[in-house]
Amino acid sequence: MDVQVGDIVVMKKNHPCGNNRFIIERVGMDFKIRCEKCSREVMIPRSKAEKNIKKIIRDDEL
């Protein structure tokens, strides 16, 4: 899966604040993602993140 820093991803499950859109902060063995609504940062393993990504929104698509 081609995910880059700065991309916005729509996840299958919502964050506890109710939002499901996250900004990719770091890519590697783990993804560091930040919630768009509450700005909370979360580190999740790459395998789990790739399973839960529903849609990728690139910067140039905005």
Image (tube, rainbow, N blue to C red):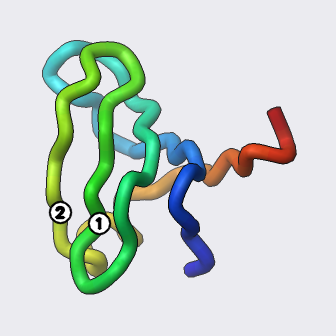
Q: Residues within 10 Å of mark 1 (few under 14, many from 20)?
A: many
In the rendered structure, the answer to whether residue 59 lies left or right of residue 4 reads right
In the rendered structure, the answer to whether residue 5 lies left or right of residue 11 reads right
In the rendered structure, the answer to whether residue 4 lies left or right of residue 61 reads left
Residue 13's tag is: none
Q: Position of residue 46 (x, y in %)?
A: 29, 76
Q: Position of residue 37 (x, y in %)?
A: 35, 15
Quadrant containing the N terminus is bottom right
Q: Image quarter for residue 14? A: top left
Q: Residue at x 19, y 73 (%)?
A: 45
| Tag 2–tag 1 contact (CB < 8 Å) | yes
Q: Where is 32 relative to 31, above or below?
A: above
Q: Image quarter for residue 40? A: top left
Q: Amino acid at mark 1?
A: Phe
What residue does disc 1 label?
Answer: 31
Quick one: which residue is furthest to the bottom in this view?
29
Q: Residue at x 39, y 30 (%)?
A: 20
Q: Where is 40 relative to 37, above or below?
A: below
Q: Where is 52 relative to 42, above or below?
A: below
Q: Residues within 10 Å of mark 2 (few under 14, many from 20)?
A: some
Q: Position of residue 39 (x, y in %)?
A: 27, 24
Looking at this view, is 1 or 62 the one in front? 62
Determine whether the residue tagged by mark 1 lies in a helix, strand or loop. Answer: strand
Spatial CA span between label 2 and label 1:
5 Å
What residue does disc 2 label?
Answer: 44
Q: Amino acid at mark 2?
A: Ile
Q: Residue at x 85, y 46 (%)?
A: 60
Determine whether the residue tagged by mark 2 lies in a helix, strand or loop. Answer: strand
Q: Residue at x 28, y 80 (%)?
A: 47
Looking at this view, is 34 or 10 the one in front? 34
Quadrant containing the C terminus is top right
Q: Considering only order in the chain, which callout, 1 or 2, is on the residue closer to the N terminus?
A: 1
